[in-house]
Image: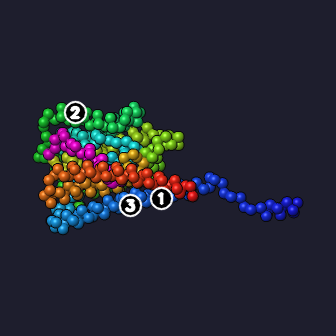
Amino acid sequence: MSTALDRQSQQPPQSPRPTDEKPGPRRSARSLTDLVFRVRELSIGGALALLIFGTWLANPGFLDDQGVKDLLLNSAILVLLATGQSVVVLTRNIDLSVGSVVGLTAFACGSFVSGTQHSAATVLLLGTGLGVLCGVLSGLLVSFGRVPALVVTLGMLYVIQGTGHVWAHGRQINAANVPEGVLRLGSGSVLGVPYLPLISALVLAATAYYLRTYRSGRELYAIGSNPEAARLAGIPIRRRVLGAYAFSGAVAGFAGALWLARFGTVVADAANGWELTVVSAVVVGGVAITGGVGTVWGAALGALLLTTIGSALVVLKVNPFWEQAITGALLLAAISTDRVVRSRTTEALRKRSRQ
């Protein structure tokens, strides 16, 4: 009996099971991917700082009080739209209808409050509701109808634009007929900071917190990274994609109401052509067009970079044509960079897993 016990005590300890070794590589993969795209966001922030500094050297008035306020106001709506678009792109989809939704909701809100004394809160709720309706229609066709997102949202773009033109008949909403409380939302400030950038920052921070903290937010990353694996894991893909489109539509409608507050005078095709700018801001900001990678903070940096480029070209008296050319070049460069980074990261992870 004692001999058997002695033999058992002399046996070498058992090696850990293969399952015990899995968390290490998984943590390593996540940390490597996070590091790569954190560097991407830092590089965008550095480029933005260099652009602002260089423009200030050429024209010191670029960073005076009014110049900074104009830069914040001009970027606020684009940051909002980039935030909503990021949530959709993370699921490996796209929403090309956000610009037309902004125009329709801005005109609809202006028509509703024209000549009345409705509050700014009413305008914001109306714009958000109309945006949700547009987003849900697109989301239903993409998630449950299984129609490609590019086809659905491009079709929605033309449907919404056509509806706006038929409704408006060339009319415009004049600032003189918009309630003072609504206009104050677009022109007012607190401690010298305009309301619009503060609102955009709050929406951005809330979205970032949701994506990072809540399980349903993290599931959007899983869907974009590998839809089949997400389905096998029991993630409700259709509901999540529908929710992403509803959120994007809500943000676009909210931005449309803020557009009315910002400019006062609006037409039905306001923000026409912003689709490329919004998608460029998201992709330049590090949100991979193939889904599953990126943050809304990076998308906001991309929006700030594109807005600053436009403002800098005006200050430096450069032909506005170059703004579109630079935007397109940045989009191509960002997509190419994502492709190279993803392939090299995948190769690096394979090498680590073999060690």
Residue 204 visible to the viewer:
no
Residue 18 visible to the viewer:
yes
**Image quadrant containing the C terminus:** bottom right
Q: Position of residue 137 (x, y in %)?
A: 33, 35
The residue pinned by badge 1 equals 31
Q: Image check: 248 left or right of 164? A: right
> Which residue sits at x=87%, y=62%?
3
Sort mark 1 into few (<14), some (14-19) or many (20+) by Cα contacts within 10 Å: few
The residue pinned by badge 2 equals 163
Magenta-colored stretch includes residue 236: no
Residue 256 higher or lower than 60, as above or below: above
> Which residue sits at x=23%, y=63%?
52
Q: Earlier in the sequence, mark 2 or mark 3?
A: 3
Residue range (magenta): 265-287
Residue type at mark 3: give it. Answer: Val
The residue pinned by badge 3 equals 39
Is mark 1 in CB contact (under 8 Å) with mark 3? no
The chosen color scheme is rainbow
Which quarter of the picture shows residue 208? bottom left
Residue type at mark 2: give it. Answer: Thr
Q: Image check: 143 left or right of 330? A: right
Residue 254 higher or lower than 152, as above or below: below
Marks 1/2: CA–CA distance: 47 Å
> Which residue sits at x=28%, y=44%?
252
Marks 1/3: CA–CA distance: 12 Å
Residue type at mark 1: give it. Answer: Ser
Sort mark 3 into few (<14), some (14-19) or many (20+) by Cα contacts within 10 Å: few
Magenta-colored stretch includes residue 270: yes
Sort mark 2 into few (<14), some (14-19) or many (20+) by Cα contacts within 10 Å: few
Q: Position of residue 157 (x, y in %)?
A: 26, 37
